Amino acid sequence: MRHMIDFNDMPLAEWEELYSLCSGIISSPLEYADALRGRAMASLFFEPSTRTRFSFEAAMLKLGGGVFGFSDPKASSVSKGERLKDTITMCSGYSEAIVMRSPLEGASKAASLFSSSPVINAGDGGHLHPTQTLTDLVTIRRLRGSLEGMNVGFCGDLKYGRTVHSLIKALSRFKNVTFYLISPRELSIPPYIRSFLNEHRQRYLEVTGLEATMPGLDVLYMTRIQRERFNDISEYERFRHIYVLNSAKLRHAKEDLLVMHPLPRVDEIHMDVDADSRAVYFRQAEFGMYVRMALLLTLCGMPREYPDAPGPFEGRHLCGNLGCVTGSEEYLPPLTSEIGGKTVCGYCEKEIP
């Protein structure tokens, strides 16, 4: 592993090493206080973030390193029209790792083509969020003891929820995991995730009701309806209150259920759930800082590699996804892959007609 673009790019042996390192940091954080002294992390957030940005910056500072970057692209040369290629090439020369969030799907993959430092995907549009996935896996494993043999419910916005997409793909690598996908039909999982599940012969059930599903769940992963993904505000208002978890609904759930949420929450989890021992979303957020410390410690030790940057592509990209990075960074080389027997864009994983 050189970049962290998609958890499924990481061999499971490397995941075990990362988990072990994370556990060591949780047990003795001060032992790592100077581990990255003199190293720098570029924090490039083209889209708003609180937990992910703060946890990455806190992680680097707790390791003794430094941080530079921006949390608003208007405060960078992007506002002057600078291309992603140039931003990344420049920042990789100044840093030992680049942490990047973008509203464009596949942007981190594109950045990795031009970076001499490891690139960490901190969320790319509605596509993937692999470091949240690492956070989720650490939370489940530490609190449940295993990532195998469980029923996992995902509830809310499963269409645009990049945390959901990432975690489904990751958990598919572990034995005997069954997925319950709880959402309105309009916000169900996108076709590429459904193709992925079918290709990997995963057990899953798509339903619209939360209460009837809850008694059999070992993990309930709540998500908010994301206002920023809707072009029509009336559509957002139609869905925003459709799932609300409260203490009354937990009465029929397992005593050892884990209630998780990538945060921020709006009103999909009532505050009366916070006092329930099964609510672990704030511990989940804390684990996120520790696993990001482990990831930075692993990747910042990588030797610098100057990639053979591809020449500008002058054709027409086949990807029709309006949210794909290829729509605005036209010079990117065309990339494709196969999911479920279908040809998909190598950046955003949407099917190419």
Image (cartoon, grey):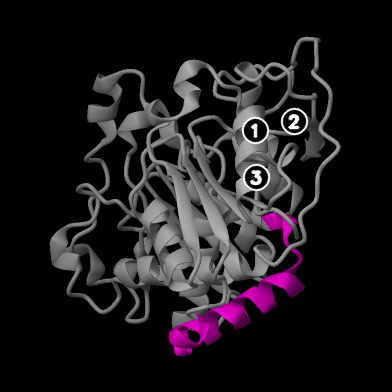
CA distance for labels 2 and 3? 29 Å
Task: Report x, y in % for residue 107.
Answer: 61, 34
Q: Quadrant of the C terminus?
A: top right
Quick one: 81 or 223, which is closer to the camera? Answer: 81
The residue located at (66%, 69%) in the rendering is 298
Contact, mark 2 vs mark 1 (Cβ under 8 Å):
yes
Secondary structure beneath disc 3?
A: helix
| Amino acid marked by disc 2 | Val
Q: Residue furthest top?
A: 315
Residue 305 in view of the camera: yes
Instruction: Name the disc covering residue 92, or none.
Output: 3
Instruction: Name the disc covering residue 348, or none.
Output: 1
Question: Residues in magenta?
Answer: 8-32
The vertical placement of 333 against 246, above or below, is: above
- Residue located beneath label 2 in the image: 344
Contact, mark 2 vs mark 3 (Cβ under 8 Å):
no
Q: Is residue 22 magenta?
A: yes
The vertical placement of 121 against 344, above or below, is: below
Front of the two marks 2 and 3: 3
